[in-house]
Structures are given as structure tokens and as C-alpha cells.
């Protein structure tokens, strides 16, 4: 009799322990499922990126855009009263443009470039050296005469300068205000160096660690060229951090985020 009771008690104890065991596994499974669900939600959340759009001052936030990781940002062209939108930039100094076809992989900052029109009263000349007549006479800016001077268009809404010159292979040049190369506009201002698959210009470098915008433009194909220099003087900046900067020579440290040099090759 006692043996039967003992067996019965042991059986009941086994069932109770088993029951607790199943409940614990169930709880563990549920916890695992909950954790997995939470992880999935977190993963889904981290798949989104934020593109923050700043004004050209580099600090004022104009907008934020949510972008799925691996997609491109759909940016709407902004407006600013009295200013012209110049494009998107990847750096606060507006030194590098932002390609709107860039795949977004992380939170990204984009800067909207704006320019205000102001009349440019400066004269610009082609300065440099080479085998061509116009640059041989220039002799690195020693001469800035009529042959070197760009013609400013009669345009009340834009500052556009042009010049047509015959150049030889190996010639090097930039555009500047005078023989001291104040307000120089070099290789970094070119909108393109090639046309129809032909490379017409090379970066000939600059003195020291100067910005590529101050690099000489080297001619790779001889012939007649028409250059167009477009300026935005109201947006010019000065490299005041340069150790040689002074107020008296400030125009030698002038740069613009928006000025451009374009060209047309007219043939031999």
C-alpha cells in the first residue's frame, strides 16, 4: 500500500516538474520571438537615413529628407528671395559638388548653394606662358594688354567675359585681374576639360599646396579656343588663414565657389 502511494506521489511530482519545464520553454520561446521581433524592428529602423539640407551659410537647416539606405535622395530645388540657386554641395565651404545620383548609405549633410547678383567691375586677362603669341607676350602676366584682355558682355543680369585665342600644346595659363595674378581663376574653375571624348586640358599644378582652383591650365590640343568666364563677385571668399594673407594683398587670396570657365574648341 505504501509502495503504491509512493509510486503515485513520484508520478505526480514528475508530471508537475514536466509541466513547469514546458512552461519555461514556452516562456523562453516567447521571449526569443519577442527579442527577434524587436531586433527586426530595430534593423528596419536603422535601414533609414536622414539627409539634412543646409543653407550656404553651413549652419541654417532648410529641410530634412528621409531616405532608405541604398537609395538616392530626392532633393527639391530650394528658393531664396533675391538669390539664384547654384546647385548642391557636399562640403560647407562649397568646394565640392554633391551628385544627386549618390547612393545614400548613412546620415548625410548636403549644402544648398545660393548666389546674389552684383555687377562685376573688374577686368580679366589671360596670363601665362607658352609658344602661342598671346601667352609668349604675356610672359606670366608681365604684359596684360588688349590681346590678353577678356571682353565683358553687356548683360544686366550676369557677369560674362569671353576671349578667343590661338593656343599651342604645352601652353599654361589662368585668368586674372592683373600681372600679380589677383583674383586668379585656374584649372579648378573649368566646368569640363573634354569635349566629344577628347581631353583638351590638363592640370599643370600650382605653387606649394595651393588650391586646385589656382592651378595652371595646360593645353593638350593646339588650336583656336573661345573661353567664357562667368563670375559672381558678391559670393567671393578670401583665404584669410593663409600665412601670407594681408589686407593689402587680399585679392591674391580671392576665390569663388561659383565662378566658372567653359570653352569651345574652334579647330586648328
Image (spheres, grey):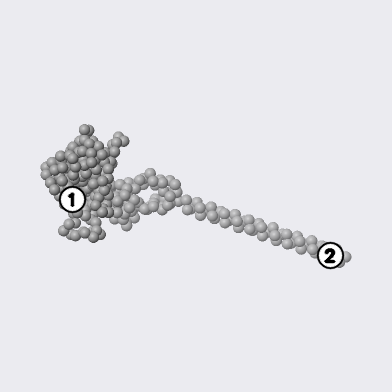
The answer to whether residue 66 shows anywhere in this view is: yes
Mark 1 residue crowding within 10 angstroms, few (<14) / some (14–19) / many (20+): many
Hey, which quadrant is residue 16 in on the image? Answer: bottom right
Q: In this view, does 215 lie above or below 243?
A: above
Task: Compare residues 249 and 154 and report the one nearer the observer.
Answer: 249
User: Quarter of the image containing the C terminus?
Assistant: top left
Q: What element carries label 2?
A: helix
Q: x and y percent of residue 143 in the render? A: 12, 46
Q: Mark 1 points at which residue?
A: 181
Task: Compare residues 236 and 214 and report the one nearer the observer.
Answer: 214
Mark 2 residue crowding within 10 angstroms, few (<14) / some (14–19) / many (20+): few
Q: Which residue is drawn at 25% across and 59% down?
A: 241
Q: Name the residue under label 2.
A: 5
Left or right, residue 14 beside residue 118: right
Numbered badge on residue 211:
none
Q: Which residue is drawn at 13% across and 48% down?
A: 142
Left or right, residue 151 beside residue 221: left
Amino acid at each position: 500500500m505504501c509502495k503504491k502511494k509512493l509510486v503515485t506521489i513520484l508520478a505526480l511530482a514528475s508530471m508537475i516538474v514536466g509541466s513547469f519545464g514546458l512552461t519555461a520553454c514556452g516562456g523562453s520561446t516567447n521571449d526569443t520571438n519577442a527579442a527577434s521581433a524587436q531586433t527586426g524592428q530595430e534593423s528596419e529602423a536603422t535601414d533609414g537615413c536622414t539627409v539634412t539640407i543646409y543653407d550656404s551659410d553651413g549652419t541654417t537647416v532648410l529641410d530634412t529628407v528621409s531616405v532608405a539606405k541604398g537609395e538616392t535622395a530626392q532633393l527639391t530645388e530650394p528658393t531664396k528671395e533675391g538669390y539664384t540657386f547654384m546647385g548642391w554641395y557636399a562640403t560647407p565651404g562649397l568646394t565640392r559638388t554633391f551628385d544627386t545620383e549618390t547612393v545614400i548609405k548613412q546620415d548625410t549633410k548636403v549644402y544648398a548653394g545660393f548666389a546674389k547678383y552684383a555687377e562685376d567691375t573688374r577686368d580679366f586677362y589671360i596670363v601665362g606662358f607658352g609658344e602661342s603669341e598671346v601667352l609668349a607676350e604675356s610672359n606670366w602676366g608681365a604684359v596684360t594688354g588688349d590681346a590678353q584682355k577678356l571682353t565683358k558682355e553687356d548683360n544686366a543680369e550676369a557677369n560674362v567675359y569671353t576671349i578667343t585665342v590661338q593656343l599651342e600644346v604645352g601652353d599654361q595659363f589662368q585668368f586674372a585681374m592683373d600681372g600679380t595674378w589677383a583674383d586668379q581663376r585656374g584649372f579648378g574653375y573649368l566646368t569640363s576639360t573634354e569635349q566629344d571624348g577628347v581631353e583638351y586640358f590638363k592640370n599643370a599644378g600650382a605653387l606649394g599646396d595651393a588650391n586646385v582652383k589656382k592651378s595652371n591650365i595646360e593645353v593638350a590640343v593646339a588650336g583656336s579656343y573661345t573661353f567664357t568666364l562667368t563670375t559672381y563677385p558678391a559670393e567671393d571668399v578670401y583665404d584669410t588663414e593663409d600665412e601670407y594673407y594681408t589686407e593689402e594683398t587680399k585679392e591674391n587670396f580671392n576665390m569663388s565657389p561659383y565662378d566658372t570657365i567653359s570653352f569651345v574648341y574652334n579647330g586648328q
